[in-house]
């Protein structure tokens, strides 16, 4: 590992953001860190195939095998500790983690939200619903936010944000794709690299990023 930080990625589905991280690592864009494990909340998630193709070990902890969020989160926490995770990345992970995880890994869990927080965020705002609401509201720009995860949904310190223009004839699917390609897949690896290089400082609930 050569002193590199261990990055554990949590997934539930197709793993497009995981692929963006894998590709960035291959290109040498993630400095001081390495993806060492992928944990999936579902068996058969395509993200597991992406991990296998890249030679990254994976663990499946099916959410359905646990009676509630607390016991599931404890299982995730135990696995993160076993993996020696320095950074946890939620890449399309569709389960809300209990505070036992967020407190153990304070300012060490990164998530992507497909809107400009504090707009269109919080409980119930995920997937296409975010883009549907943005279009209903008639916003002229949208984008994505990379943020740390805390006990409240989408309320942790913001690390990076990026925008795209909203076009008159956009559908939620078209807007989702534009944001993924132009913001999520670029800024998530950048935020991960910044973390691994110790270039993010959190003070009084705000993240200060050294972009030099």
Image (tube, rainbow, N blue to C red):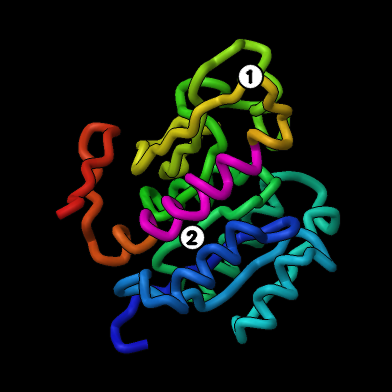
Q: Nearer the viewer, residue 109 or 23?
A: 23
Q: Secondary structure at mark 2?
A: strand
Q: Position of residue 69 (x, y in %)?
A: 70, 45
Please provide percent x and percent y for residue 23: 52, 71
- Locate residue 178: give its quadrant: top right
How crowded pointer 1 is (Cα within 10 Å; few <14, some 14-19, many 20+) is rated as few
**CA–CA distance between discs 2 and 1?**
37 Å
Q: Which mark is residue 88?
A: 2
**What secondary structure do most residues of the magenta stretch adopt?**
helix
Q: Residue at x 25, y 51 (%)?
A: 200
Quarter of the figure with residue 15: bottom right
| Residue lying farthest to the top in this orientation | 137
Q: Residues within 10 Å of mark 2 (few under 14, many from 20)?
A: many
Give how far across and how far down residue 188 sits, in percent: 45, 54
Please name the residue that numbered disc 1 is placed on.
168
**Which of 83 and 164 lies nearest the eye of the viewer?**
164
Q: Above or below — where is 131 with respect to 194? A: above
Choose mark 2 or mark 1, whichever is in front.
1
From which residue to which does the magenta span run?
176-191
Quarter of the picture holding the N terminus: bottom left
């Amino acid at each position: 590992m050569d002193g590199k930080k261990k990055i554990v990625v949590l997934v539930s589905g197709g793993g497009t953001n995981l692929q963006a991280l894998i590709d960035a690592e291959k290109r040498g864009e993630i400095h001081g860190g390495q993806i060492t494990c992928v944990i999936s909340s579902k068996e058969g998630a395509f993200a597991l195939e992406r991990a296998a193709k890249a030679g990254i070990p994976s663990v499946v902890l099916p959410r359905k095998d646990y009676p509630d969020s607390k016991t599931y989160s404890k299982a995730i926490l135990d696995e993160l500790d076993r993996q020696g995770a320095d950074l946890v990345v939620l890449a399309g992970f569709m389960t809300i983690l209990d505070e036992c995880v967020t407190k153990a890994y304070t300012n060490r869990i990164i998530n992507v939200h497909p809107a400009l927080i504090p707009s269109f965020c919080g409980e119930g705002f995920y997937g296409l619903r975010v883009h549907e609401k943005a279009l209903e509201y008639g916003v002229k720009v949208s984008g994505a936010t990379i943020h740390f995860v805390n006990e409240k949904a989408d309320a942790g310190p913001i690390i990076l944000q990026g925008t795209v223009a909203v076009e008159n004839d956009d559908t939620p699917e078209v807007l989702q794709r534009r944001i993924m390609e132009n913001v999520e897949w670029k800024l998530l690896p950048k935020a991960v690299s910044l973390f691994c290089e110790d270039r993010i400082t959190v003070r009084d609930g705000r993240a200060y990023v050294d972009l030099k």
